[in-house]
């Protein structure tokens, strides 16, 4: 049987103070390190904490919870008792850093796990990490305190010890994510450090829930044939530049008034407004790099607030589309060039850039950026991109960036 301390001892661990030694969290001294089987049993409780650190030298389980910490400590103690693991209350120094920066410093790799609303944290997740033969150093909850138990979207960061070993498993992550229907994002811990970034977005099917060229084609009476070409181009089956010119030629003669009608009803992607509001508040520089059209991109810019827009300019003569665009086509190569140019102009290292897109013409941009994120993307893009969000809204990108969400 486990030897458990009483509530008074837990309160001592949470509030103990003497000269040069202040305790702000609950610590549990254990006879040995927790193995993954035990952690798997403990995870539903530990995931409710603000953060958890596993100190191997002692070994000590350090639990930091700002909401009713004493009661939370009781829950952890109860679970340890169920597992037959002896423990003693342990005083934790204020030097133990529970900030995001402190947690990132304790590990080489960070695995972000985002569970959509109505789903559950996969019970076999830690068993999978055990097979990777990596050490779990800490975990941090990014979603609000009530999210794990209320059926809301739930997000955790797992801090792991060996980037090279973790990186070797990246190809398997999307298979695991699909089986569990969760979003998994793996990144080096250093890439998660809070700092100013350039964050570039594709527009169509990324910031808005449609492909504008298909909407225009529908009004021109050629919707089905243009949509078919668009789908093949986004899957990477056709060269974007040639397929773009083919689709544009079918819009020749479309009344320019139709452009305004489409622009007035652009469906903004769920989560986009909250995402951009948060990015602005944090001082990031944001841009649209789109193979679509600048008229619509500026409409999106005005609605959700981005710093700049780069897209194709529709050519209009005598109030009708000519079937061509003015200037250079914004294709995959142009997006990469623009990403680099904006980063240099803004004094942002390329490693501190983030690119988000869904189509094959976004892949070079995703590969060039410090972090490339495929958002609800086509299969080829999802499988190739460094990171993918398949189930969450655009707001989920904040979790991938390591930004915790409030209770609002």
Image: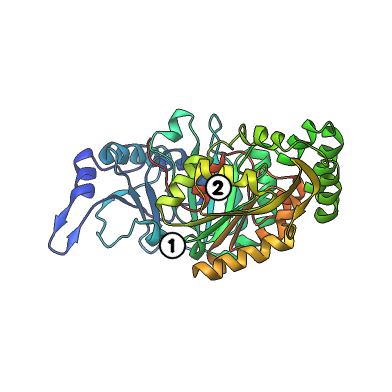
Q: Which residue is mark 2?
A: 126
Above-or-below relation of 353 to 244: below
Location of the C terminus by quadrant is top left
Q: Which residue is pictured at 83% across the width and 45% down the height? A: 247
Circle 2: element type: helix
Q: How far across and how far down the image is residue 9, in percent?
A: 21, 44
Q: Are marks 2 and 1 in contact (CB under 8 Å)?
A: no
Horizontal side of 378 relative to 370 (left or right) equals right
Dot 2, how many residues are within 10 Å of its Cα: few (below 14), some (14-19), or many (20+)?
many
**Sequence order check, earlier mark of 2 and 1:** 2
Q: Which residue is pictured at 15% across the width and 55% down the height? A: 17
Q: Is residue 384 visible?
A: no
Q: How far across and how far down the image is residue 192, in percent?
A: 48, 60
Closest to the observer: 18 or 117?
117
**Which residue is most to the front?**
318
Dot 1, how many residues are within 10 Å of its Cα: few (below 14), some (14-19), or many (20+)?
few
**Which residue is most to the left?**
19
Location of the N terminus by quadrant is top left
Q: Which residue is mark 1?
A: 195
How is the rendered protein coloured? rainbow
Q: How far across and how far down the image is residue 251, in percent?
A: 82, 41
Q: Quadrant of residue 229?
A: top right
Circle 1: element type: loop
Disc number lying in front (2 or 1): 1
Q: CA distance from mark 2 to mark 1?
A: 30 Å
Closest to the observer: 396 or 62?
396
Q: Is residue 312 visible?
A: yes
Horizontal side of 270 relative to 335 (left or right) equals left
Closest to the observer: 66 or 5?
66
Residue 16's label in the rendered image is none
Q: How far across and how far down the image is residue 372, in percent?
A: 62, 57
Q: Which residue is pictured at 77% across the width and 31% down the height? A: 219
């Amino acid at each position: 049987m486990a030897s458990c301390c009483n509530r008074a001892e837990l309160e001592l661990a949470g509030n103990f103070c003497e000269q040069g030694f202040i305790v702000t969290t609950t610590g549990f001294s254990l006879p040995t390190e927790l193995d993954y089987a035990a952690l798997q049993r403990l995870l539903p409780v530990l995931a409710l904490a603000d953060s958890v650190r596993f100190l191997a030298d002692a070994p000590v389980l350090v639990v930091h919870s700002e909401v009713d910490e004493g009661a939370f400590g009781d829950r952890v103690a109860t679970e340890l008792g169920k597992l037959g693991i002896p423990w003693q209350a342990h005083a934790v120094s204020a030097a133990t850093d529970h900030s995001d920066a402190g947690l990132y410093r304790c590990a080489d790799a960070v695995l972000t796990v985002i569970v959509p609303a109505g789903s559950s944290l996969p019970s076999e997740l830690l068993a999978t990490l055990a097979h990777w033969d990596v050490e779990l150093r800490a975990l941090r909850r990014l979603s609000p305190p009530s999210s794990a138990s209320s059926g809301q979207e739930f997000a955790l960061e797992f801090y792991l010890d060996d980037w090279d070993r973790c990186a070797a498993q990246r190809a398997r992550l999307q298979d695991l994510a699909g089986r569990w229907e969760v979003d998994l994002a793996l990144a080096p811990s250093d890439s998660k450090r809070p700092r100013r970034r350039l964050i570039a977005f594709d527009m169509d099917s990324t910031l808005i829930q449609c492909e504008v060229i298909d909407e225009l084609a529908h009004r021109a009476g050629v919707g089905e044939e243009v949509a078919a070409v668009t789908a093949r181009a986004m899957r990477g089956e056709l060269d974007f530049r040639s397929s773009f010119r083919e689709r544009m030629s079918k819009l020749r003669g479309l009344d320019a008034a139709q452009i305004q009608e489409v622009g007035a009803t652009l469906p903004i992607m769920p989560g986009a407004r909250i995402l951009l509001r948060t990015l602005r508040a944090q001082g990031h520089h944001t841009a649209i790099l789109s193979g679509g059209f600048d008229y619509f991109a500026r409409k999106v810019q005005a609605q959700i607030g981005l710093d700049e827009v780069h897209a194709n300019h529709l050519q209009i003569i005598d109030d009708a589309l000519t079937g061509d665009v003015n200037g250079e086509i914004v294709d995959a190569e142009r997006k990469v060039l623009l990403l680099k140019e904006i980063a240099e102009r803004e004094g942002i290292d390329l490693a501190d850039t983030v690119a988000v897109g869904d189509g094959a013409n976004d892949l070079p941009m995703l590969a060039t950026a410090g972090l490339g994120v495929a958002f609800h993307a086509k299969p080829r893009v999802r499988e190739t991109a460094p990171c993918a969000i398949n189930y969450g809204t655009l707001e989920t990108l904040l979790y991938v960036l390591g930004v915790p969400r409030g209770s609002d």
